[in-house]
Image (cartoon, helix red, strand yellow):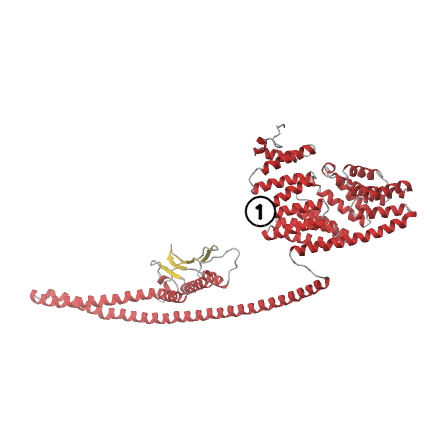
Amino acid sequence: MGCTKKTGLDNNTISSVDSLPVYLSLANEDSIPLKFRQNYNLKALNIILNQKDDSINKVNLFKVANRYYNMSNWKSYLNTTKLILERSEKSRDSVNMAKAYTYLGDYYVSQSVSDSAFMNYFKAEKTYLKIKDQINLAKTFLSKANLQYNEGDFFESEINVFKTLSILKKEKNVNEILYESYNLLGVLYNEREEYQKALEFQNKALQILEDKDIASEFQYKAASLNNIGFIYMNMDDYKAAEKYFEEGLKQKNLFEQRATLYAILLDNLGYSRFKMNDTYELPDLFYKSLEIREKLDLVSGIVSSKIHLSQYYAFNRDTAKALELSKQALALSRTTAKYINTLEALKQTASVDPRNASIYSREYIKLNDKMLKDERKMGEKFSRIAYETNEIKDQNSNLQEKNKTLVYVFSICTLLGLFFYVYKTQQAKNRELLFKQQQQIANEDIYNLMISQQNEIELTRIREKKNVAQELHDGVLGRMFGIRISLDSLDKLDEAEAASKRKKYLAELKNIEQDIREISHDLNREKSELINNFIAILNKLFENQINTYNSKLITSFDPNIKWEQISNMVKINLYRIIQEGLQNCNKYANADFIKVELKNVNNVLIFSIEDDGIGFNTKKTKNGIGLHNIEYRAKECKGTVTIKSVKGEGTKLTVRIPIIPNIYQHNNDI
């Protein structure tokens, strides 16, 4: 792809949004020479810098940074990341700020500047905590744990891994992070010589890999098999170790995808066979591993391979070759900052050069002490960074111990206080519940007494009706019978006399008619009062509600409800349901209005109470004793209860009770 250079790049290319994904894709293509890949990434960066600074722009900048990281172009990676951080801080973009901090942490890890790496990871952690991004918080904890492990701070590393796992328990689709956590725990416990725990977590890591969602190109399975083999090698079970190393080497495309791991497995397999005095493929396995490591310029790996070769030749009594290789390993290890390589090389050189063994031993002791001190200092530095970032500074270890004691005492006192509070609260709730139950029983007794009194009234009315019936039979009907007989006798009289008597009989009939009308009106009035007695009781309840509470109450009664056909048992339960429903509205709803409706639909009595209150989640909230009572009473009447509620949109309670006529109770109903 050619272009005419104008201020570094073709202007048409820079302004073309379509070319950006092409450049980013080419910059990530391993088959293209590094020089061209870096050029494509620079072109992509120039396009992005000429675009509007928004969230998409930052996403593309992170892509550019990723490609610089993969190309080990650390300077450009650092500059790009700092640019993202600067823009994110300017726009107060916490999400991208936190991500930029993790990228800076990764940069300082690559440069072995552990304190700066830790500081940036710590800043990322605080930001993710603030924005409640649990997945990225877990990843940051894991990055800190890896850093602390590499610096020998095993205890703090373990704590951060368990922080990661506690977050991952609540998340989904996190198998890759879960695998890395279990794998790191296995490595940590192996370092601490807790081999059974190490095997337990490495096997958990292997189980995670059964999920096919994890990309195979990372060769996690080969890594876990190598780690398990290494644990067995530390346990001196070289036969079991050999089996895992061989299985690891059989993983498909291992050399192409992770040549570094392939070299480690070759070296470990050779060493396990060497320890079993099995010379099969030795020393070829060591040399194959060494060749790969030299091509990849893996200094620590080269040192390890040469030490193992030195041990192999020393065992086979080729002392000169063994000494040559151990000295090469020692010289190379001194060029690195990893003391562990130098310690291993010193130990081997001392064993094959007995005349100078004391010199190497003194250097070994001195270097080992220095390494332990540096590890301790680094752990302290990590703690200091964390405290200083939070503006918390501990003055000395004695003060820390005192603070811990105070925390323990305060925690115990808090727990005791909390327990006492819960105990007292529960006692109060139990007393309140008992009071409510007693009040409910009292209300039942009062209402039953009302029903009993009403029944007495009705019995009196029935007696009165019988008296009226007797009066009709013996009085009105007797008088009418007499008039009828008298009218029959008019046929025997002359017209003048008959006319006079007819007027007299007609007046008497009018009197009888008036008497019958009055009796009829009395009976109708009694029937109306009989029907309206239950409505009157409800109205009394509603009147109390209006006078006691601020909520506006709207009531609606269907005139088609035939109360005379509804049994006392149903009315008692319905009254209590209405009372309980109003009480729930008053206690929990915080409503401005309450609507109560009673209607008859196809011989089904439908009662509903609706409010515009705060509502609740019917799936999550457990029914209290009030709702249980409503359901129980509806069930007693062969009815059903439904509750509809949405948070912030009020609640509607609906009770449906079938109307089953009971002819034996018509004269006793209230």
Residue in the foreground of this view, choosing between 65 and 454: 65
Q: Residues within 10 Å of mark 1 (few under 14, many from 20)?
A: few
- Residue 379 horizontal side relative to residue 587, left or right: right
Q: Quadrant of the C terminus?
A: bottom left
Q: Amino acid at mark 1?
A: Lys
- Residue 166 horizontal side relative to residue 482, left or right: right
Can see residue 181? no
* Above or below: residue 439 compared with residue 652: below
| Residue 74 location, quadrant | top right
Residue in the foreground of this view, choosing between 281 and 133: 133
Residue in the foreground of this view, choosing between 260 and 552: 260
* Above or below: residue 650 compared with residue 317: below
| Residue 306 location, quadrant | top right
Residue in the foreground of this view, choosing between 520 and 484: 520
Residue occupying the far right of the picture? 355
Q: Which residue is mark 1?
A: 90
- Residue 57 horizontal side relative to residue 280, left or right: left
Can see residue 114? yes
* Above or below: residue 590 compared with residue 20: below
Residue occupying the far front of the picture? 7
- Expressed as whole percent of the image width and height from the top left, the position of residue 536 reads 35, 66
Q: Quadrant of the N terminus?
A: top right
- What residue do we see at 68% from left, 59% from top? 393
- Expressed as whole percent of the image width and height from the top left, the position of residue 330 reads 84, 44
- Expressed as whole percent of the image width and height from the top left, the position of residue 139 reads 65, 48
- Expressed as whole percent of the image width and height from the top left, the position of residue 652 reads 44, 57
Describe the element under mark 1 as helix, strand or loop. helix
Total numbered labels placed on residues in the image: 1
